[in-house]
Structure formats: C-alpha cells, structure tokens
Image (tube, rainbow, N blue to C red):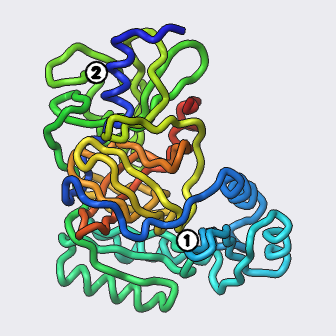
Amino acid sequence: MRRTLRARIFLSVLISLPAVGLGSGTAGAASEPTPGVTASASQYAVNTNLERELDDDNSAGSYLDPATGELVVTVTDSAAAEAVTAAGARPKLVERSTAQLKTVMNTLDTQANITGTSWGIDPSRNQVAVEADASVSVASMTQLRKVAAGLGEAVRVQRVPGVFKKEVDGGDAIYGGGYRCSAAFNVAGGGTARYFLTAGHCTNQAYRWAAWPGGPSIGTRVGTSFPTNDYGIVRYSASGQPYGRVDLYNGSYQDIASSADAIVGQYIRKSGSTTHVTTGRVTAVNVTVHYPEGTVYQMVRTTACSAAGDSGGAHFAGNVALGIHSGSAGCSGTNGSAIFQPVREALSAYGVHVY
C-alpha cells in the first residue's frame, strides 16, 4: 500500500512520541554507563515458555547474568531446576518464591501504601526492591522502614531523587485536551485500520489528538486505562500504513518487528521527546507505583533517564517492543528510575500487534 506524505509525517511525529511525564529528571541525560546485557530472541522465547511452565510457588522470576549474558531462572525445588536446564537456561536455587514475594508486596500495600513509593520483584537478589522518592516525609519513611524491617531480608529500601508525578511539558509531540503526550508504537489489528499506543494517563485527558497545538486531528482515542494500568490507544484518522519504527533522534530510526516481556538485567533504550534516546537496564518487574493520581501495577522499572514530557514514549531493545513509558522519579547523573507499562499487556487488551 502506498504511504501518503501525511502518513509519513504522522509517523515521524508519533513513533517516538514520548509524553506527559509522570516524573522529573535531567533533559538530554547521557547514557547509562553499565546498561546491562543484550537479550536474544531465543532468550525471550525460553523466558516466556518457562513463565508458562513454572508457577509462582517454584520460581521467583528470571534475569540475565551481567557477566555472561546467560538467562538465569530462579527455582525453589529440584524438579523446577530440571525443567529450566532442559529448556536451555541456568537454574538458580533461591529461598523465596514469587508467591512469597507477592505476599511481601501485599503487606507493603496494606501497611505502607504511601504516595511516592514503588516496589517490585528483583529476581537477581530474590527480594522486593522498594523505592521512596523525595516527597516521602520523614514520618512516612519511618513507617516504611518499620514495615520493611518486619519483612526481613525479603525487602530492601532506597531513596531515589525527584518525585513520581505527572508534569505537563511543552515540545513537538502530540497534543490533546491541553496536554502534550507521545506515542510509543504504531500497531495494527484486523482490517486496514492503524493505531498508536501511548500512556493511559494521556488518553484519559482527550478524545482527539493533533501533531501540534491547535492542529488538525490525526487520530481519536478508542481505548484508555489509568490508573491500575497505564496504556491507551488512538486510531489514525488518515488512511495508509505508518512505518512501524521508533525515532532515534539522530536522523535514523529503529524498525520494530516483535514484542516481548522485559527480563531483569537486560539492556533497553527509551525514546522520548524530552530526553530523546537514553539507555539503561531493567532492574525489577511486577512493580507497583503509587502516583499521586492513583496506583499502577505490574509495571517494569529501569535505570534509563527520563524527564517531564517523555511519558507515552517507547521502551525497546533492538527491534523488540518492550513497553510504554509511564513515569519516573527523575534522574541523578546517568542513573534514572524510569517506569514502563509492559507493551504486551496493552497489545492483548486491544487485540493489536506491532509490525
């Protein structure tokens, strides 16, 4: 199908569309110095298969060994270890299962539900990794540490710079309802219709979206979910097939061919209109984040830098789509604490696929 000039313009704007930032940080930050190891297509496949085969009682997740790049799968018994070995990954015996770590997070949810905190599973340390931003008061921090102490070595707590929050920012991206946002990935469903994914806290704000303030509509919202999740979908108004690629902000683009769930320890890139392309590694999965506007669940945490205006942007590795930028507690030097919505959940919710 011939791509129209209008479709090409839409894509150059939308494919990197990073958005209403749920956080603050340093614009134009440098790359993460130790960004992690690269995940291969076979490792994504093995990881997905083992996630289906192992349950929450006999595993606590997987990660990539930072020294060797091997896929390591945590196990709690010998039968699970044998299954991991047979699948071509390396088993590691751990004390706590996913079920036990989820119980720990449930305790945090009920006893330390504090705005400005987040927690998720770090399988490489077999712990729940808790972060508290600068807005958490001394009294709340004392409460958080007290709850964490009662959970023993299953929890570690650290402060992070900045504040988990929404911030509207100016820039050349997409606009709706007085807000600036960005698209993550172009997607297709049944038929000839084309769409783009972005953050749900963006699509909550407007039905029609434009490429510049007050510009003509380029698409209309057909789905949105925030809080609990953070994804939304907009259908293009124009016919044609926008390219399935991400803007690298250096005159080139990264083609996107597939999607996967992120693996702890892996290298990722984030493309956003404020900080452009930054890199990092995945540090936790099944992350809960307490934003002032509501709580989101089952997110992914990375060390990529981001800033206000990046929300809705693309998290990816090579030609694999991984997530939709949700927010951040800012960036210290080259070390950030960016949160993204796993893209496969959004694709499944809307019955679409990357291309």
Horizontal and vertical percent position of residue 344: 56, 44
Which residue in the protein does label 2 denote?
208
Q: Residue at x 33, y 86 (%)?
A: 145
Q: Position of residue 208 (x, y in %)?
A: 28, 21
Q: At which x and y percent is residue 197?
A: 42, 34
Instruction: Give whichever of discs 1 and 2 has the lower sequence position.
Output: 1
The circle drawn on residue 164 is none
Confirm whether residue 98 shows in the render: no
For the N terminus, the image quarter is top right
Q: Residue at x 70, y 80 (%)?
A: 92
Q: Quadrant of residue 212?
A: top left
Q: Is residue 12 visible?
A: yes
Q: For the residue carrying disc 1, how many other residues have a C-alpha within 10 Å: few (<14), some (14-19), or many (20+)?
A: some
Q: Is residue 124 above or below residue 338?
A: below
Q: Image check: 161 left or right of 281?
A: left
Taking the spot 27% from the left edge, 15% from the top edge, the residue there is: 217
- What residue did someone put label 1 on? 102
- On-image quarter of the C terminus: top right
Q: Residue at x 42, y 70 (%)?
A: 34
* x and y, in percent, of residue 341 in the image: 44, 50
SS label for mark 1: helix
Q: Is residue 133 left or right of residue 237?
A: left
| Residue type indicated by callout 2 | Arg
Q: Is residue 193 left or right of residue 8?
A: right
- Looking at the rendered structure, the kind of residue marked 1 is Lys
Locate residue 77 relative to residue 273 in the image: left or right: right
Q: State which mark lies toward you, 1 or 2.
A: 2
**Viewer-side residue, 115 vs 230:** 230
